[in-house]
Amino acid sequence: MRRAALIVAAAALATALIAVIVQPAAARERTYYVAADDVVWNELPAGRDLEAPHKLPPLTPPTLGWKFHQLVYRAYTDGTFRSLAQRPANERYLGFLGPLMRAEVGDTIVVVFKNDTRFAVDMRPHGLPSSAGPGLVAPGGRTTYRWSVPESSGPGPSDGSSILWTYSTGDKYNVASGLYGPIIVTRRGMARPDGSPNDVDREFVIAFREIEEMNAKTWAESLADPVTNPHHLKASSFPPRVLFNNNIYVNLNGFAFGNMPMLFMHRGERVRWYVFASDSSFDFHAPSWEGQTVLYRGTRLDVIPLNVSQPAAVDMVPDDPGVWQIYCSVNIHLDGGMEARFTVQP
Ligand SMILES: [Cu+2]
């Protein structure tokens, strides 16, 4: 009798343990306070090419220069939107990108949004189901988004443990104006408490971006501001936009010619790179890594194809210490400064 009771108790304990083990982590709500702000963006904070021996292309009129007004999503500490959330040093390379959002499948991303620009803009996630949203938010307006993250927004069978989506404002020519940010979604059961994949040591998000400044909402503002138009060029100085114009810039996260803050990793770490292209007229890119190889959908490469607006994730285990480049192999983009540096430490 006593033995039977023990067996029953042991069985109950085992059942409870199994229930704990197979129970997915409780779904979380992850809240972000984000404002759309108007800033003067500088593609060359160092003021020079950091990727010798290249030379900066001459900025002959009609070209404004490396600084221009951009709209950016920025994280704030709370719903008063009084204090910017300081970006950690190891995330400053994200540049013009909005705050890095994370979710595990099953979670909900809550975004408390304020529009501090002079234009009607909003936030829409790509790849998450609530893309429609309430529509554009008037200047000064606020709204709260709730983006659920179902299985269909998580990694597919051929993906690793996490994938990249983006959020942006919904209307045309948003890429020229700015307003982009990353969302990393991790497979259910594979996320650390902060949402990052537990089988990866280090992650980087790089936007391959082509800007046609004349299409930016902030074009008139950039023209009117002597900081961004030091030569006082007039709108009439610029040819009408046909297919391309003279004010196209390419960059990685808003940085050109090696001006992105240095990326650091250690030899032997499991490094995941998420890349995506923006959506201007001809945003086709060839993200390339110098000195290392990556796994892309099970294939080993050192350059991958990236179509307009497309995200992709590749995995690297760096094995050769040194300072290397990540760049676009499309010649005209590399000539335009689409390159950054990363350091593999021993
Ligand atoms: Cu490119």
Image (cartoon, rainbow, N blue to C red):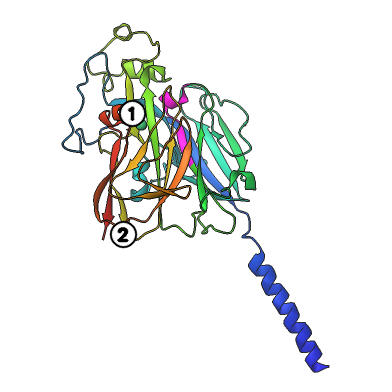
In the image, which residues are magenta?
Answer: 173-182
Is 175 included in the stretch rendered in magenta? Answer: yes
| 203 vs 181, nearest the viewer | 203
- Write down the residue under mark 1: 250
Q: What is the three-letter code of the residue carrying label 1?
A: Val
The residue lying at 37 percent from left, 8 percent from top is: 240
Specify few, some or many for label 2: CA neighbours under 10 Å numbering under 14, 14-19, or 20 or more.
some
Query: Vertically, is 7 above or below 314?
Result: below
Q: Cβ of disc 1 within 8 Å of ligand 1?
A: yes
User: Which residue is situated farthest in the right direction here?
Assistant: 1
In the image, 10 versus 223, the foreground residue is: 10
Q: Is residue 138 left or right of residue 148?
A: left
Report if residue 281 lies within the magenta region. Answer: no
Return the residue at label 2. 267
Dot 2 lies on which element?
A: loop
Residue drawn at the location 36% of the way across and 59% of the way down: 269
Q: Residue furthest left?
A: 53
Q: Quadrant of the C terminus?
A: bottom left
Residue drawn at 55 percent across, 28 percent down: 141
